[in-house]
Image (cartoon, rainbow, N blue to C red):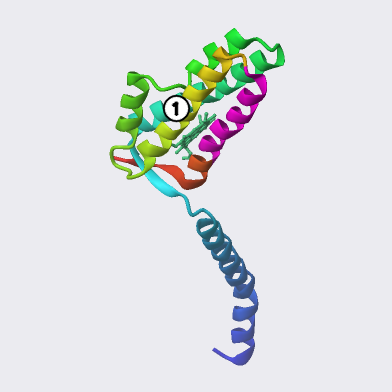
Amino acid sequence: MNFLKFFYFIAILSPYALYAQDHKKMMDQMAMSDSRKPVKLNAMMAKHQLANMREHLNAVQEIIAAMSDRNFQGMKIASQKLATTPQMAMMCEHMGQMTPGFTQMGMALHTEADKLVVLADKKDYNGFVKQLSVTTKTCTSCHAQFKQEIIP
Ligand code: HEC
């Protein structure tokens, strides 16, 4: 290869090389910035877990709707949808069986939601608002720690 040919060769290839390098850097950065641990679930459980999650978000929405009417009965009923029940505990146990720490974080949500039920019963509006903040923090702290990984 003479010098000119070599020069063309490099000139043509370098934008691709730069692009590939940039792309790889970006992907690496994305992987690095996502330090969430995998919660290992098979495909069916993964779908089921997301459906549970959407129900949880619905419950939060219903809680806030009831709060906007100062409807303590409604606040209580919606909070009960997040509270601890034997079925809820079994579900958390099931989802976290392959992921240390996951079940505990799930149960933390339900334990905090139990307190919402009590506060709604007592008609303690301000206490309820504070406790809703504590409760929804258990959502966001689990989301900060875990992401789904589908296993066969
Ligand atoms: C024990 C851990 C944990 C707790 C507690 C938790 N979540 Fe999640 N949630 C997850 C995981 C894991 C995902 C999947 C995230 C991923 O793979 O990127 C998820 C996903 C979701 C999604 C997306 C659903 C979809 O269809 O994609 C919603 C909405 C959600 N959570 C709402 C909530 C709300 C609201 C709460 C609290 C009331 C809550 N979650 C508490 C672990 C948790």
Magenta: main secondary structure: helix
Q: Quadrant of residue 17?
A: bottom right
- In this figure, which residue is indicated by the disc labeled 1? 110
Q: Identify whether 77 is placed above or below 145.
A: above
Residue 130 magenta-highlighted = yes
Residue 5 or 95: which is nearer the viewer? 95
Q: Quadrant of residue 84?
A: top left
Q: How many marks?
A: 1
Residue at image location 57% in from the left, 69% down from the top:
21
Answer with left or right where residue 105 lies relative to residue 78. Answer: left
Residue 120 or 6: which is nearer the viewer? 120
Residue at image location 61% in from the left, 80% down from the top:
10
Q: Quadrant of residue 103?
A: top left
Q: Identify whether 141 is placed above or below 132.
A: below
Instruction: Please identify the quadrant where the C terminus is shown.
Output: top left
**Residue 34 on image: x %, y %:** 51, 53
Residue at image location 53% in from the left, 11% down from the top:
77
Q: Which stretch did the figure color magenta?
A: 124-140
**Residue 45 on image: x %, y %:** 34, 30
Answer with left or right where residue 70 lies relative to residue 144. Answer: right
Is label 1 in a helix, a strand or a loop? Answer: helix
- Check disc 1 and give the amino acid type: His
**Residue 114 on image: x %, y %:** 47, 23
Q: Identify whether 81 is placed above or below 98.
A: above
How many residues crowd around disc 1 within 10 Å: few (fewer than 14), some, or many (20 or more)?
A: many
**Residue 96 on image: x %, y %:** 33, 37
